[in-house]
Amino acid sequence: MKLVKEILKNKAVKEVFSVTPESLVFNALTLLAEKNIGALMVIDKKGKVVGIFSERDYTRKVILKGKSSKETKVQDIMTSARAMYKIKPETDINECMVLMTGKHIRHLPVFDGQKFIGLISIGDILKAVIVEKEKLIDDLSDYIAGKYA
């Protein structure tokens, strides 16, 4: 099974978008919409990851609580770095699927020790699984057709 580092290496868009904790939620939402993504890393002015901001944070902590996205700061609703689920580059994608399914999350930050190196989504995992299954089907079809004889 594939490892997270292989997914990061093969991602079409390698750039991870971020906001500061002081950013307004409205601006973070605008960036999510512009980039067609579902989460942003929250990085302070020193370059340290302090959290993650997702569409789910917005819907559950702004809309449902009657707050305004133009007045609320990301730091007030983000998932803090302490509460974030993190993975390593050597993590197997099956482990990622179990974690994402069990914890009902769609994005996993990837850390090599203390260093943030990327972000994978459930879509990235699904794509990797599908590619792997298609290759297996092709190999089995070739075997059945006698191409390996």
Image (tube, rainbow, N blue to C red):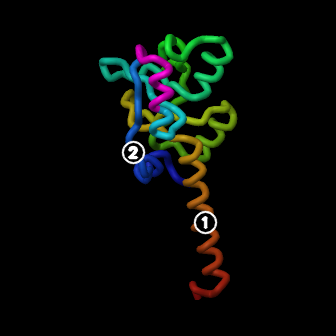
Instruction: Identify whether 64 is placed above or below 55.
Output: above
Q: Amino acid at mark 2?
A: Lys
- Magenta segment: 21-31
Question: Is residue 42 or residue 109 the one in the foreground?
Answer: 42
Tell me, for residue 88, which label it has, or none.
none
Residue shown at 61% from the left, 67% from the top: 136
Residue shown at 57% from the left, 84% from the top: 148
Tell me, for residue 14, which label it has, or none.
2
Residue shown at 55% from the left, 20% from the top: 83
Q: Position of residue 3 (x, y in %)?
A: 50, 49
Question: Is residue 132 or residue 31 the one in the foreground?
Answer: 31
The question of residue 147 being in magenta is answered with no
The question of residue 27 being in magenta is answered with yes
Q: Quadrant of residue 131?
A: bottom right
Residue shown at 51% from the left, 12% from the top: 72
- Mark 1 lies on a secondary structure that is helix
With 65 as the anchor, is 28 left or right in this view? left
Q: Quadrant of residue 66?
A: top right
- Mark 2 lies on a secondary structure that is loop
Q: Amino acid at mark 1?
A: Glu
Tell me, for residue 134, which label it has, or none.
1
Q: Quadrant of the C terminus?
A: bottom right
